[in-house]
Image (cartoon, rainbow, N blue to C red):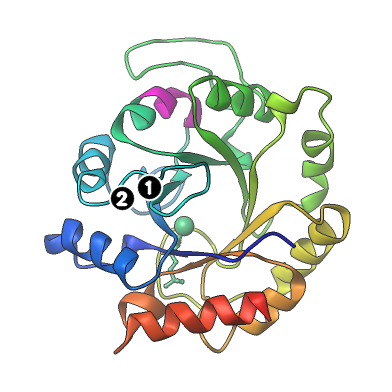
């Protein structure tokens, strides 16, 4: 399996000290920052947009290689993922992870542009790659993992995702209960793709990490478990050990 990547979700950071919290979590051993983008439409919650992402980018050193330390892993819980690709690239996003469920939206390329053309997950992945970012595809709990096979097997490598995100809660809020019912998706993906980056997000922490790691996840998002801990560096180390054991 690929190496362990620990990605604290800054949804549980102190929003009044976001820049500080972002650089601190990296110095405490985190690999990536998981940046949750919510539009109040795809999910019933709102977070932040490109100006804030650009500001916090200034507090975290840019990765020197693909998947390197300081990667901004932007989890796009938005209804029109294609519309925001260029804006988030400009803001400093490194990995643009959109939801499969939203990928068939109208394919406008910028907030100003209007289009009636529908996009598809494979077209969107190619578009993200053409803009110079890594591409991820996320599945909500209700979505079958079977929708992914055709995408992962695309003949054009530019249409294949660099990461798959299996949600282990309903997207929208931090601090929810881990859904072990989602782990068979991770197992199935790992069985077929030994080298794929498989991310899990929602309810991960010291008491749930072993199940997720045993299923084959290697990219671990944790919000409340990291930012709520007495000693975040200890939790980050524990998550890493569970994946690498
Ligand atoms: C939920 C977000 C998660 C969230 C996880 O919609 O995608 O990234 O911050 O929070 P915890 O780790 O507290 O479940
Ligand atoms: Zn997330």
Cβ atoms at labels 2 and 1 below 8 Å apart: yes
Q: Is residue 57 left or right of residue 183?
A: left
Q: How far apart are labels 2 and 1 at the CA level?
A: 5 Å
Label 2 SS: loop
Return the residue nearer the eye: 41 or 91. Answer: 91
The span shown in magenta is 81-86
Disc sitting over residue 46 in the figure? 2
Q: Earlier in the sequence, mark 2 or mark 1?
A: 1
Question: On residue 55, which mark appears?
Answer: none
226 shown above or below 49: below
Residue that protrudes farthest toward the left in the picture: 16
| The C terminus, quarter of image | bottom right
Q: Name the quarter where the N terminus is drawn.
A: bottom right
Majority secondary structure of magenta residues: helix
Q: Is residue 12 visible?
A: no
Provide residue 176's location: percent of width, then percent of height. 47, 75
Does mark 1's beta carbon lie closer than 8 Å to ligand 1? yes
Residue at numbered disc 1 = 38
């Amino acid at each position: 399996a690929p190496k362990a990547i620990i990605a604290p979700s800054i949804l549980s950071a102190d929003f009044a000290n976001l820049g500080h919290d972002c650089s601190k979590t990296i110095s405490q051993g985190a690999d990536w920052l998981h940046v949750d983008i919510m539009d109040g439409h795809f999910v019933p919650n709102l977070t932040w947009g490109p100006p804030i992402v650009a500001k916090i980018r200034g507090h975290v050193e840019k990765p020197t290689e693909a998947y390197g330390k300081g990667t901004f892993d932007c989890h796009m819980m938005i209804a029109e993922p294609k519309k925001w690709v260029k804006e988030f690239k400009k803001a400093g996003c490194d990995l643009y992870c959109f939801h499969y469920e939203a990928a068939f939206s109208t394919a406008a390329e910028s907030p100003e542009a209007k289009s009636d053309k529908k996009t598809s997950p494979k077209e969107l992945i190619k578009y993200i790659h053409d803009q110079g970012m890594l591409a991820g595809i996320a599945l909500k709990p209700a979505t079958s993992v079977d929708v992914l096979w055709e995408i992962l097997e695309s003949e054009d490598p530019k249409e294949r995702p660099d990461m798959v995100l299996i949600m282990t809660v309903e997207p929208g809020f931090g601090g929810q209960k881990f859904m072990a019912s989602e782990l068979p998706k991770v197992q199935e993906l790992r069985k077929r793709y030994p080298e794929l980056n498989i991310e899990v997000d929602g309810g991960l922490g010291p008491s749930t990490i072993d199940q997720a790691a045993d299923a084959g996840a290697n990219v671990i998002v944790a919000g409340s478990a990291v930012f709520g801990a007495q000693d975040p560096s200890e939790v980050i180390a524990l998550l890493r050990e569970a994946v690498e054991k």
